[in-house]
Image (cartoon, rainbow, N blue to C red):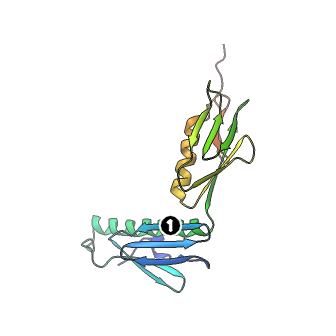
């Protein structure tokens, strides 16, 4: 069976990261923390020589050519990408940087609550989800950190949605590398 191009590449396990496969769960421990993942039933994993090999399962009924085979290939590639994200998350971690653009816009951490003053008549409090740490190096910068890539991106997206950048002056909360294309104002 031929897997997808992404699914063929083995996941390299760096030193200091421990990987175990128990039943249908993959346990990954590293210096930043630990993560678990349930392995899809259409995928077989082999852990050897510091590499994790993801292969299509020979036990499933999607071995015939057609739509089922394509589904099985894509699942193998997705599982491989998710495992790679978990391994790099427990070894290095993930980070998203947000910037506050606007006069008087401020962010401050108070315990497990992010306090935002972003132009509303009241301060906005954002409760930090479990598994995420938020830092405010300055009043206009927010750093969202964690070991789960999906959760870091989702949390950063939720913070950005509180006051997304408006198209005329660009005021609001934006990602650090985001480019806002400004509209031209009306002219008489």
Please give the name of the residue rendered at 46% of the width and 70% of the height, measured from the top-left corner: 80
Q: Residue 42: which quarter of the image?
A: bottom left
Q: Is residue 117 left or right of residue 62?
A: right
Please give the name of the residue rendered at 72% of the width and 40% of the height, measured from the top-left corner: 140
Residue 99's x, y, as percent?
68, 42
Residue 126's x, y, as percent?
57, 40
Give 119 or 81, whichever is nearer the viewer: 119
Give the farthest residue toward the bottom: 49
Residue 188's x, y, as percent?
66, 13
Q: Residue 120: which quarter of the image?
A: top right
Categorize mark 1 by other alpha carbons within 10 Å: few (<14), some (14-19), many (20+): some
Give the farthest residue toward the right: 138
Is residue 54 visible in the rendered structure shown here? Answer: no
Please give the name of the residue rendered at 56% of the width and 47% of the height, measured from the top-left corner: 128
Residue 101's x, y, as percent?
70, 36
Please give the name of the residue rendered at 36% of the width and 73% of the height, measured from the top-left corner: 24
Give 91 or 59, whichever is nearer the viewer: 91
Give the farthest residue toward the top: 188
Is residue 111 visible in the rendered structure shown here? Answer: yes
Task: Name the quadrant of the N terminus.
Answer: bottom left
Image height of 132 relative to 19, above or below: above
Q: Is residue 62 left or right of residue 98?
A: left
Which residue position is annotated with label 1? Answer: 35
């Amino acid at each position: 069976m031929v897997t997808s191009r992404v699914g063929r590449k083995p996941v390299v396990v760096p030193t200091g990261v421990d990987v175990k496969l128990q039943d249908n769960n993959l346990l990954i421990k590293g210096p930043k923390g630990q993560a678990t993942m349930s392995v899809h039933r259409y995928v077989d994993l082999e852990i050897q020589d510091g590499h994790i090999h993801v292969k299509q399962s020979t036990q499933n009924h999607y071995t015939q050519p057609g739509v089922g085979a394509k589904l099985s290939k894509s699942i193998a590639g997705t599982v491989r990408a998710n495992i790679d994200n978990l391994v790099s998350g427990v070894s290095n971690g993930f980070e998203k940087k947000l910037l506050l653009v606007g006069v008087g816009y401020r962010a401050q951490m108070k315990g497990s609550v992010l306090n935002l003053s972003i132009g509303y008549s009241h301060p906005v409090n954002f409760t930090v989800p479990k598994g995420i740490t938020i830092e405010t190096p300055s009043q206009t910068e927010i750093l969202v950190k964690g070991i789960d890539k999906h959760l870091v991106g989702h949390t950063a997206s939720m913070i950005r949605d509180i006051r997304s950048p408006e198209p005329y002056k660009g005021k609001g909360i934006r990602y650090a590398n985001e480019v806002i294309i400004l509209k031209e104002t009306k002219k008489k």
